[in-house]
Image: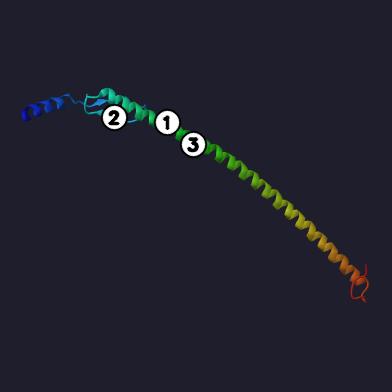
Amino acid sequence: QNTELREALSLLKQQAVPRPLRSIPGEPVAHSRSSVGDAAGSDLLAAVAGTGAKVTEQVKEALRRDLSLIRSLQATKQEIENRCNRERRLRASIERQLALKAEVLRSSILADTVQQPGLPYPKR
């Protein structure tokens, strides 16, 4: 019996020539070590390839959504930066106006004090 089994094993090894299986374009080619169960192996490979394609499509879709979100965030950031710049310019303008008015007020108070030196406070 052992001799028969060895001969059968030797015969199977001779028949087991690596053969390329169907694959997705761009993917490495898988090799089958035996011709036994080619239909099942092909079905399995097709299922694995189909699953890989689904995962790839899901990743692509997630990347598209992420890209859309990033673009939206960049637009919002730009809008906020523009608002900050406008507010900064407005604040600087108001501070200049206040400084000018404060200077005019000081000058007015000083002029009133000089005109009426005997009074502790300027007359209004």
Left or right of residue 4: residue 77: right
Q: Residues within 10 Å of mark 3 (few under 14, many from 20)?
A: few
Distance Cα–Cα, label 1 vs label 3: 12 Å
Which label belongs to residue 54?
Answer: 1
Residue in front for this viewpoint, 51 or 106? 51
- Where, quadrant-wise, is the N terminus in this rendering? top left
- Residue at left offset 38%, top offset 31%: 51
Q: Secondary structure at mark 2?
A: loop
Among the 4 quarters of the image, the one containing residue 99: bottom right
Q: Residue 93 location, x and y as percent?
A: 75, 54
Q: Residue 113 location, x and y as percent?
A: 90, 71
Which label belongs to residue 62?
Answer: 3
Which label belongs to residue 1?
Answer: none
Identify the residue position indicated by label 2 in the image.
30
User: Considering only vertical position in the picture, is 104 above or below 121?
Assistant: above
Q: Residues within 10 Å of mark 1 (few under 14, many from 20)?
A: few
Residue in front for this viewpoint, 57 or 123? 57
* Nearest to N terminus: mark 1 or mark 3: 1
Distance Cα–Cα, label 1 vs label 2: 19 Å
Residue in front for this viewpoint, 99 or 59? 59
Three-letter amino acid code at the position of disc 3:
Ala
- Residue at left offset 49%, top offset 37%: 63
Q: Residue 56 location, x and y as percent?
A: 42, 33
Q: Secondary structure at mark 1?
A: helix
Three-letter amino acid code at the position of disc 1:
Lys
Left or right of residue 114: residue 38: left
Among the 4 quarters of the image, the one containing residue 43: top left
| Residue closest to the far top | 39
* Nearest to N terminus: mark 1 or mark 2: 2
Q: Secondary structure at mark 3?
A: helix
